[in-house]
Amino acid sequence: MDMASFAGSGAAGGIGGMVAGILGAELRPGIELVMETVELESHVQQADLVITAEGAIDAQSAYGKTPAGVASLARKHGVPVIGLAGKLGDDLDELHKLGLSAAFSITPEPMSLQEAYNRAEKNLEQAAEQLARMVHSLSGRRSLTG
């Protein structure tokens, strides 16, 4: 049995590949299982905006990570998606094609990885507040002009 022949059995999926090969388990991307379990689609259908977050949003994020799954689902329902991350990569084109409207770093200044971990909660809170203020100001404009 060739472990490399199972989709999703490489890198972090090695154990999953073994279970699929030996026990015949079905391999599914984790984000699909999580979205199904929390019934995310029913929530997205009612949303005006979706916000997702990841430690790093980069070119790899388009291939099975949370921002890609959330963006694809929201795109299906015409809902814009904003991604927040501790670190942003250079090439987000594939994520934009999947439905990510925009992505922003929560890290307000250069810092070590350890410092970013230590300040993650505060940085995320501050970035989320600023994002909420922007969305609120835009929704107020729309109601005044529309």
Image (spheres, rainbow, N blue to C red):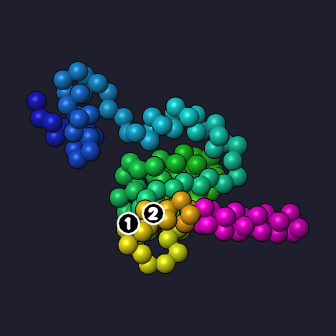
The label on residue 34 is none
Q: Which of these two is toward me, 137 or 46? A: 137
Tell me the residue at 23%/47% (across/down).
Answer: 11
Range covered by the magenta-colored residues? 125-146
Residue lying at the far top of the rendered structure? 23
Residue 71: x and y in percent read 52, 52
Tell me the residue at 45%/63% (across/down).
Answer: 118
Residue 87: x and y in percent read 43, 67
* Residue linked to disc 2: 118
Q: Is residue 83 visible?
A: no
Q: Is residue 114 above or below residue 50?
A: below
How would you classify the magenta stretch by its main secondary structure? helix
Is residue 144 located in the magenta-colored stretch of the structure?
yes
Tell me the residue at 43%/59% (across/down).
Answer: 55
Q: Is residue 83 above or below residue 6?
A: below
* Residue linked to disc 1: 114
Find residue 30 and report its image quarter.
Answer: top left
Q: Quadrant of the N terminus?
A: top left
Q: What amino acid type should be assigned to the residue bearing mark 2?
A: Asn
Residue 56: x and y in percent read 41, 61
Q: Which of these two is toward me, 75 or 141? A: 141
Q: What amino acid type should be assigned to the residue bearing mark 1?
A: Gln
Left or right for 122, reference 26: right
Cβ–Cβ below 8 Å for labels 2 and 1?
Answer: yes
